[in-house]
């Protein structure tokens, strides 16, 4: 995420519990996971741009 940009919520909090039904999930897990996903997407977008593409592809991840 770039400086000054508003964070986008990509994680559905209710789905985290579904993914790990045998665990309790702390309230800050969704925010931490969201930050990791945003970082991953930013890195993937940069990779696509470096390869001269404007389309994000699975291989960029």
Image (cartoon, rainbow, N blue to C red):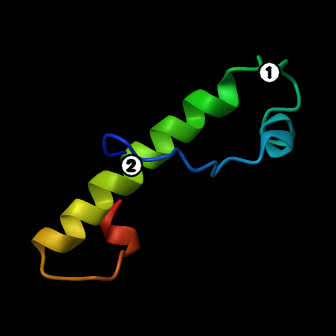
* Residue 45 percent across, percent down from the top left: 29, 64
User: How crowded is the residue under tag 2: few (<14 C-alpha within 10 Å), some, or many (20+)?
Assistant: some
Q: Residue at x 32, y 69 (%)?
A: 59
Query: Closer to the N terminus: mark 1 or mark 2?
Result: 1
Q: Nearer the viewer, residue 30 or 57?
A: 30
Give the left or right position of residue 21, taking residue 36 as reference.
right
User: How crowded is the residue under tag 1: few (<14 C-alpha within 10 Å), some, or many (20+)?
Assistant: few
Q: Nearer the viewer, residue 50 or 6?
A: 6
Q: Quadrant of residue 28?
A: top right
Quadrant of the image containing the C terminus: bottom left
Of the numbered discs in the image, which one, if any, rests on residue 25?
1
* Residue 31 percent across, percent down from the top left: 62, 31
Residue 58 position (above or below residue 53): above
Classify mark 2: helix, strand or loop: helix
* Residue 60 percent across, percent down from the top left: 30, 65
Q: Residue at x 18, y 72 (%)?
A: 49
């Amino acid at each position: 995420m770039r400086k000054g940009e508003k964070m986008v919520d990509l994680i559905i909090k209710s789905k985290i519990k579904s993914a790990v039904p045998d665990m309790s999930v702390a309230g800050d897990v969704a925010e931490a996971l969201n930050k990791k996903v945003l970082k991953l997407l930013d890195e993937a977008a940069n990779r696509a741009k470096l390869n001269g593409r404007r389309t994000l592809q699975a291989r960029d991840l």
